[in-house]
Image (cartoon, helix red, strand yellow):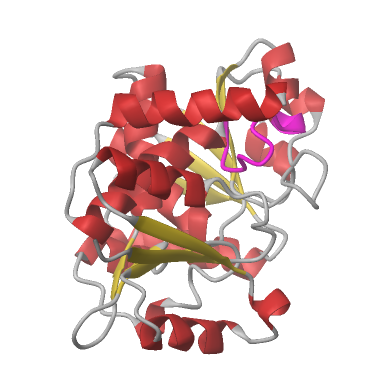
Amino acid sequence: MAAIRLGLIGDHIARSQSPRLHVLAGRLCDLNVTYDRLIPADIGMDFDAVFDRCAREGYRGINITYPYKETVVPRLEVPDPQTATIGACNTVLFGDGQPQGHNTDFSGFAAAFRSTFGDVSPGVVAMAGAGGVGKAIAFALARLGARELSIYDMDVSRANALAATLSGSGVPMQTIVAESIAAAADGSDGLVNCTPIGMAGHPGSPFPADAMQSAGWAFDAVYTPVDTQFLQGAGAAGLAVMSGWELFFHQGVQAFRHFTGREVDAPALRSALLDLHREAMDG
């Protein structure tokens, strides 16, 4: 059986679980899947050179993560209008003609939110980070019925650009650019981290402890580690939490569908991934 060759381009991905997810999903679907971590700095190439190598060397598709989800878009055909509006892609398919781009962060977050919190509105949300994953989650929050989104990014121009894109797309969610993370969190129902703060190599929390007093739920897009400092603080403050692992899982299942055309048994895949995680922790 010929291998389906997949990969992930990003920085700080040495601990990514994406290879494990896609290889296990392949086994459950009787497919021979390989999945490579591709870190441009380690390979000694820039992003474009790594992307070109994947296209040239027979990869069926690749995932794109921080900080390249927006960088890749000009190189892609993006068939979904919502993804084109978001302006960020995390899933790329190679074939005849121009590579196709998709955003399973957008659809994966919506699925993860419903699975974790049920059929409720996100309410008023404060979000740290307006980069590639922040764009996807902002649009997903609008689809989920969030009433208001307050965005904070250290790069104010990026926050302003996201707010303008949301407003221009006609979503009913009110969008505000906050002057500080504390101002964004004030009066919010939900707190969302879409920055790399908290991931391996970037310790800390984007939200101070006193910003968590009025909120009811929290989500961290970081999933390595799963139990980030931000989520630990949110849990201690009594917030319901959704880890980045849930987004990782749901977006991964949807990316696998794009890559292979197969529908993996999601409960079986979740169980297999958690078993491997427990074995690694015990070992």
The quarter in which the N terminus is drawn is bottom left
Residue nearer the viewer, 229 or 95: 95
Please report the residue visible at 47 percent of the width from the left and 82 percent of the height from the top. Answer: 51
Please report the residue visible at 32 percent of the width from the left and 53 percent of the height from the top. Answer: 255
The quarter in which the C terminus is drawn is top right
Above or below, 1 against 227 in this view is below
Among all residues in the image, which is located at the extreme front? Answer: 1
Residue nearer the viewer, 117 or 182: 117
Magenta part of the protein: which range?
219-230
- Is residue 190 on the magenta stretch? no
At which x and y percent is residue 162?
48, 62
Among all residues in the image, which is located at the extreme top? Answer: 238
- Is residue 229 on the magenta stretch? yes
Above or below, 96 against 11 in this view is below
Above or below, 66 against 126 in this view is below
Residue nearer the viewer, 53 or 174: 53
Give the left or right position of residue 240, taking residue 136 as reference. right
At which x and y percent is residue 118?
33, 17
Residue nearer the viewer, 22 or 201: 22
Q: Can residue 187 be seen in this snapshot? A: no
Please report the residue visible at 49 percent of the width from the left and 52 percent of the height from the top. Answer: 19
Q: How many marks?
A: 0
Q: Can residue 110 be seen in this snapshot? A: yes
Give the left or right position of residue 62, taking residue 78 as reference. right
Give the left or right position of residue 268, taking residue 138 as reference. left
Quadrant of residue 2 in the image?
bottom left
Please report the residue visible at 80 percent of the width from the left and 32 percent of the height from the top. Answer: 208
- Tell me the chief SS of the magenta region: loop
At which x and y percent is residue 224?
66, 41
